[in-house]
Every structure is written in C-alpha cells, then in structure tokens.
Image (cartoon, rainbow, N blue to C red):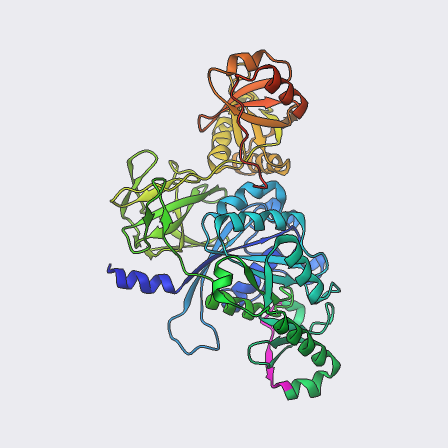
Amino acid sequence: MSSEVISREVKRRRTFAIISHPDAGKSTMTEALALHARMISEAGAVHGKGGRRSTVSDWMEMEKARGISVSSTALQFSYSSPDTDTDVPNVINLVDTPGHSDFSEDTYRVLTAVDAAVMLIDAAKGLEPQTLKLFQVCRHRGIPVITVINKWDRPGRTPLELIDEISERIGLIPTPLYVPVGIAGDYRGLLDRRTGDYIHFERTAGGAKIAPEEFLTADQAAEREGDVWSAACEESELLAELGQDHDQEMFLAGQTSPMIFTSAMLNFGVRQLLDALVEFAPPPRGRESIDGVERSVTDPFSAVVFKVQAGMDSSHRDRLAYMRIVSGEFERGMVVTHAQTGKPFATKYAQAVFGRDRSTVDTAFPGDVVGLVNAMALAPGDTLYIDPKVQYPPIPSFAPEHFSTLRVTTADKYKQFRKAVDQMDAEGVVQVLRNDVRGDASPVLAAVGPMQFEVVTARMKAEFNVDTIIEPLGYSLARRTDEQSAPELNRQRGVEVFTRSDGAILALFSDKWRLQYIEKEHSDLLLEPLVAAAD
C-alpha cells in the first residue's frame, strides 16, 4: 500500500490509555466512551450495588466480584464528532488499564503502546498516589496527558482547588476547555470557553443512555441559570487572565493539559472528552529501535507486543498477544519475523477485541491494537517486522517486593500445574523464579503487589482446575546479580539466589539492612537495582 494511504489512515487514529487511582471511575468511563461512539446501546454500570453489572472491559470473575480492574483490555471503535460533517470517522484505540497499584507493571506495559493518556481524577479526592506515579511514567515517556475531573455529579472540591493542586504537585498546567456550570454535586452543564456558549445536560434513567444535550447562548444561559452561570463565567475569565488557555504546542510538549469536567456515571461531558481526543491528541508516530534509528509510520510493517493474555474465553482456552502496530500496513495472514528469535511468524488468526467480544481483523494500520491468537512464542516487549529488520527496546520488568512459593495440592495435577505456571509467567502476571534447591515443584513467585498472587491462584482454578497453595517467603527486595557473585551470596544468611525465566539472576534479601551489610562487607559482588514501580 502506498505511503500516502498509510499516512491518511494514521491521521484518523488516536491511541490512548486511561490512567487513574482505583475507584476513580475508569472502567465506567471506558464504557461511557464506547456508548457515545454507539458501540454499545446501554452502559454496563448502573446505579445501586444490587443492580450493578460488570462493565464490558472487566471480564475476569475476580474483577466482576470486586468491581475493580486487574487486567488491561483493548477496545477499538469508530467515532465521528456530531460537530463535523466528514464521512470518514476517526478510529479510536482505547486501552483500559488496571487501576490497582499492585498491577502497575501491567499498566506500564500499556503506556509503551499509546500516544496519549487520559488522567482521570476523582473530584472529591484530587490527585492520589497511584495517579501521580502513572503520570510520572507518562512524563518520562513523553506522553501528552488530558486531565478529566470525574464524578462531578457528587460533592467534591472546587475547580480552582483542583487546578492549583495539579499545578503545584506535578508541575503540569491545566488548561480547562470547559468550566462546569454548578458546583460538584450539582452538575448542570458546561461553559464552552472557546465559544462562550452553554451545554446543558439532561439525566437519563440510571445513566444507561447518552445524556441529551441542549445548547444555549450566553444570554440564554444567564437567564436560566442565574448566579451559577455567572460564577462559571468569572472562573473562565480568571483562567484567561492567568494564561490557562489551551496551547497545542505546550500540550504536546507535556507542559500543559486540557481539562474537562465529567460524570462518567451520568454520561455528562463524555462527548466533549471524545472530541478533545480527536482534536488534540497526537496521531501515531514512528519509534526508535534499539539501534537508535527511527522507524517511520510509513515504513514496512512492524509492531510491538505489549500484553499477553489467556483465559478471556473459557470456550476457546486460547492465548492472545496484543500488538501495537508501529509502522506500515498489517494484513491478516502475512508472515512476519519475530525479532527475538529470527523465526517466521504467521498471522492467520488476527482479531480486534471489544471486551470479551472479538472480530477478525483483515487489515490494520499504525496505532491499531491487534490480538494474535495462540501466539505461544510471543512475550511482552517482543518485536514483529517485515524487512528491513528492526527491533524495539524491551519492556523492563519491575522490581518485585513480594515473594511466595506456589504448590499444587494434589500430585495428579502436577502436569496442569506446570503448564499453568508457564502461562502465568509468559503473560507477565507474575515473575517466576527457580533454583536447584527448590526445584520446579515449588517455584517462587515474585510480584509488585500481593493481589497478583490472588490472580494466579484464581486463574489456575478457573482455567486449569488446579488448586494451589501460596506461602509467603521472608524476602522483601531483589537485586540483579551474576554467576560469579551467586555462590557467595547463597552462603549469606537471609539471602537466596534465583534465575528468572528471562535468564536474569536475582538475589533476594530479607530486608534492606541485610542488603546494606552485604554491600559493605562484599563490595566486589554485583548487586544492581531493578526498575522500581514508581520510576
């Protein structure tokens, strides 16, 4: 396909992730966006715990039971803004990320595959630790951020308080595109700062449908809303005096962030967020290889695997590798090269994923996320390409802080147990560590957070019918070492050396004081820090 056609397709695409602290409404927002794109007819989240249904992006039983996301999922849909008269819709690739901090490693992988991020903040709670950590990852990777203040239908803080907090704590200047009309808990609509008009929202039953919008002039808004409208106008004027108007160059440079006030539960402000993503978020761009050479989006096909997931469909028992297309056109059935092994890889079974629903993908372009079925040889960070050869930098593993042994309860299930452990390891659900002393019957699982262990045991039971026992180990930190240092480290009290499945040799320590002692007494040993979850 010509580079002109590929360039045209790239301009239509927006690929982004939603980052937030747990319970900020991320999965509800994901569904609200899909609802406004008319990919679903009714939102999955409705008022009241008794009537609440799981969202389409939360498919694991554990997610449904707890009402949290513990695994990233990819949704693709087309969207045309009602304000435009084009017949060519935009293609939205939305990657929903885990909200819980125990799964920050999975979120980090997702952030290697997107071009922009939506930072979702609870109107009452403001910036929270997990959101702050994820924003730092976005800043490090040069990912521009759109800020969304969610849950404006509930009591919360004032817009200016939230704006000041973001500016002071993370150095990002919010530039609200709209000012909410009505305080938090009395959400009536939005003042469009660029036109001066009023967008009034009407509630629907349980927030299950798209909220109707009524457009009023400033004079009409003043007559209807009175002092509430005047207060919104005053806030808008103050922001203009402070220079907090949208500037595209500063946004792309990571200095400012367009801000929108929403209620994902009521579907208020959701269309405005979609329109902002289409208008301001950058289209896909090229990527540097490990050799420092950039692969342009119009170059021959290449892609990066950022997520491997199994168990999404109990009737198929297959394994899906999510790849983000970096360059060129993807055609189903094409034979590509797996950079890590140099071996050919057939792409006969390629699918687009919408929650648990799948459809066959025949073609795709840079920015698109495509699932490759039964891609047993692929792991997060792997590169696929068509000549000329390219390999992108690997995705680093985080430094684990929790360690447990895993055992099967009955010997007759050992074969299934081994298969399940290998699958969890390949997906990156946990890191699997082994040494000669413990053997394969009792591997050590290493995790950023303890909930990762719960996912392992739950999925082993659900997908492999294997009951397991998790037993915590008395280690709290790990360091990378080498074969020369391993024998001496194994002789030390409170230290044990393992080999990770990627070949890395890790030394586990009981506590930081034991590590400091050994570093002081044996300065010749190699003890390198791993990537921390907050880096």
User: Vertically, is 88 above or below 323?
Assistant: below
Q: In the image, is 155 to the left or to the right of 338?
A: right
Q: Residue 326 at what x, y percent from top left?
A: 36, 51
- Residue at horizontal 63 percent and vertical 66 percent from the top: 262
Picture quarter with the C terminus: top right
Q: Residue 266 at what x, y percent from top left?
A: 64, 68
User: Vertically, is 190 above or below 131?
Assistant: below
- Residue at horizontal 30 percent and vertical 60 percent from the top: 6
Query: Nearest the camera: 5 or 364?
Result: 5
Q: In the image, is 342 to the left or to the right of 482?
A: left
Query: Nearest the camera: 7 or 154?
Result: 7
Q: Residue 275 at what x, y percent from top left?
A: 50, 69
- Residue at horizontal 33 percent and vertical 48 percent from the top: 294
Query: Nearest the camera: 138 or 469?
Result: 138
The answer to whether residue 210 is magenta is yes
Picture quarter with the N terminus: bottom left
Q: Which residues are magenta?
A: 208-218
Report the label total: 0
- Residue at horizontal 72 percent and vertical 59 percent from the top: 124
Quarter of the rendering containing residue 261? bottom right
Q: Residue 193 at what x, y percent from top left?
A: 59, 76
Answer yes or no: is residue 98 visible: no
Answer yes or no: is residue 298 visible: yes
Quarter of the rendering containing residue 160? bottom right
Quarter of the rendering containing residue 243? bottom right
The answer to whether residue 120 is magenta is no
